[in-house]
Image (cartoon, coloured by chain):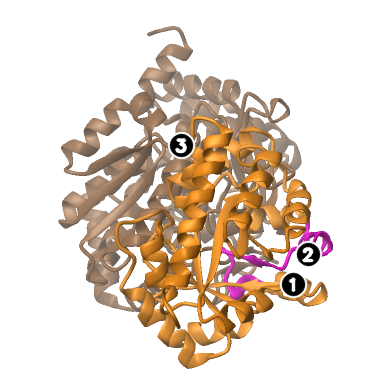
Chain colours: A orange, B brown
Amino acid sequence: MSIAVAFEKARAEGRAVLVGCMPAGFPTVDGSIAAMKAMVESGVDVIELEIPYSDPVMDGPVIQKASDIALANGVRVADTMKIVEAVAATGAPVVTMTYWNPIEQYGVDRFARDYAAAGGTGLITPDLIPDEAHDWLAASDAHGLDRTFLVSPSSTDARLAMTLAHCRGFVYATALMGVTGAREQTSTAAPTLVARIRAVNPDLPVGVGLGVRDGAQAAEVGSFADGVIVGSALIRCVLEAPDEASGLAALRSLSAELAAGVRAVKR
Amino acid sequence: MTDVLLPDATGHFGPFGGRFIPEALVAALDELDAAYRSAKADPVFVAEFEAMLRDYAGAPSSLYEARRLSAQAGARILLKREDLLHTGAHKVRNVLGQALLTKRMGKRRVIAETGAGQHGVAAATAAAYMDLECVVYMGELDTERQALNVARMRMLGATVIPVTNGSRTLKDALNEALRDWVASVDETHYLLGTAAGPHPFPELVRDFVGGIGREARAQSLERLGGLPDAVAACVGGGSNAIGIFHAFVPDEGVRLYGFEAGGDGVKTGRTAASITAGSKGVLHGARTYVLQDADGQTLESHSISAGLDYPAVGPEHAWLHDTGRAIYEPVDDSEAMAAFQVLCRTEGIIPAIESAHALAGALRIIPKLREELGREPVVVVNLSGRGDKDAHTAGQYFGIL
C-alpha cells in the first residue's frame, strides 16, 4: 500500500493515521520484524523504520540507546531491505527515517533502487534539507519514492513553501522545538504549524511527531494532524521489557491504546 | 587554483561543507549568518574585536625565531606563539569573536562542546568576560580524564554537563550540544569550537582565528623581507590550521602543510587522521572527510592529543586537500612526542601535544624541502597552544610521573 492510500483511507474514516516508529535491527533484525508486525496487528497504520546511526542528533536518549543496541548487535544498512520486505508483506506501508550519511555511503541511487524493490514507500530525512538534496530528489523521482522533509515552528514562510514543494507523500511537522522523546504535554505550537502548512498546501498530509506517548495525546494530535507519529514511547516498551514476550505484549497494548486514541476524535 | 572567496553563499567549498542539519536549526543558522555579515562590515564591531584581542588576549602573538631548534634541524624555523595568548591557545580568538557576536544578536546564553576541555575553558572564559550564561557539554569519560579542566570551567562560572551517550567523548558532547540548541535556539548561541559544522560556522570560525595567518604573514614580510617557504600546522577539526593557512592561500609559493593525528599509525585503525584514513561523508552538519565504516557509521578516533581526537575535519581542509593547495600528512603519537621533547630541550618551550604534531611534521619535511630548494628552508610552524595542560600525559609518556 502507498502512503497516499493509507492517508486517504483514514481520511474517509474521519480519523488520523497512526505512524509507529521502530529502529531496524533493534534489538535484532528478527526481533525488530516481530515488533513491527505486532504494532501493525494492534492497529498501527504505517511503520516508520529508523535506520540506526552512530550520531543521531535529532533523536533523544531512547532512540539513541535503541540504535546503539541495534548497531552493537551488528545490523547493517543492507538489512533494511529484508525488514522492509517482511513488514510490507503485512499490508502496512513502510516509510524509512534515516540520517543522510548511511544513504550517501550506500549510494543514493542504489539505495533508492533496492529500497523501492523491497517495497518501501519513501524516506523521512531529518538532517537533509531540500537545499542539499539534489541527488535524493533525482533518485526518488527515478524510483518512484516519496520524500518527507521536516518543517519546524521556526521555518519561515518562504522555507515552508519551498520545503512543501519538495515533499511527496506527507510532510513531517516537528511539533516541539526539540528532539524526540515522550513528553508530559504535546506542543501548542503544533496546531499553528499545521495551519500554516495547510494554508500553503491543503492537499499534502501532515504528520506530527515528537512527544506523543499515550492514547489521550494521540487523540489530541489526531484532532488537527493527518498523521500521529509515535516513536520513543513505543520503543521504550521493548527497551525496558525484561524479555521479548513481555516487550511485545507492552507494544501491543500501547499500539492498541494509540489506535483507539486516533479513533476517539472525529475529524 | 583555489578560490579564496569560498565558501559560496550557501556555505560550500566545492563539494564540501553546506548544511546537513535539522530544519529546526536553519532559522538560527540564517540569523547567525546575517548577524555575522553585518558585524563584519561594521567598523565598531571590528574595532571592538581587535581591542579585545589586543588588550585581553594578548594578540598579536609573536613570531619567534627558534635558533637552537633551527640549527638542529638545518632550517630557519619561526614559531607563531599562539601559546602565549590568554588561556594558552589560539582558541581564545574564536571564543571572543563568537561571544561578541552573541551579544550583538541579543542572546544571553552560550553552549559549547568540549573534548579535553580546552574549548570549554575558553568558552567559559569568554562567557565570564562578556557576562553570558555558559553551559558546556563534555563526554563523561573526558570529565574523568580531565578533571582539572572541569574544575577550571566551574571556577569560571560555567555549568558542565557530563554526556553519558554513545562513546561518552567529544562527538557525543557535540551531538548533545546540538540537541540543546535545537530546543533553546531563541535565547542561545552555540559557540562551536572549531572551523567545522554547518554553514556559516566553518567560515565564521576561520575568520575569527584568521588573525593568526594575517599576523604571521605581515611579521614574515617584516622580519624576512619575504614570505616563508612553508607553513605547518596540526589538524584536528582544523581551526588553528585554517587560521594560519588562510592568509597564505593566495601565495602560491608558500607550501601549506597540515599534520593530522596519526595515533598509533593509520594502518592500525587507531588513528584520528580523517583526511588520510577517512573518506567523503557527512558528519555534524557538513560534507567532509570522515572516519567511517562502509555503512557510514562514525568510527571512534584515537590520538594521544585530546584536541586532535576527532573523527572528521573542517570542510575547507577537505577542499584544500582535494585541490592540492595544502598537503595533509599523518604524524603518529610517538613522532609527535619526540618533537615535544625536542622543543622542550632546545627552546625551553613546552608545547601542547597538538602543536607538537605540527612541529614533528615540519621536522620531517625539512630535509626534503632543503633538497628541493638547494638551501635552508624557512618554515613557519603554528605553535597553537602551550603544554601545561599536557603535563600529566607527557609526564606519564616519558616515565617522569
Classify mark 2: residues with Cα within 10 Å, few (<14), some (14-19) or many (20+): many
Q: Chain of mark 1?
A: A
Residue located beneath label 1 in the image: A145
Neighbor class of circle 1 (other Cα within 10 Å; few <14, some 14-19, many 20+) is many
Tell whether B28 sits left or right of A133: left
**At x 27% / y 48%, what residue is drawn?**
B135
Up/down of A264 relative to B98, above or below: below
3 or 1: tag closer to the N-terminus: 1
| Residue B75 seen in the current view | no
Q: Is residue A60 magenta?
A: no
Q: Residue at x 63, y 42 (%)?
A: B274
Mark toward the viewer: 3 or 1: 3
Residue A168 in the figure: left or right of residue B183: right
Residue A55 percent across, percent down from the top left = 54, 47
Specify the quadrant of the image occupied by residue B101.
Answer: bottom left
Give the mark nearer the N terminus: 3 vs 2: 2
Point out the image quarter for the C terminus of chain B.
top left
Residue B271 on image: x %, y %: 62, 31
Give the chain of mark 2: A
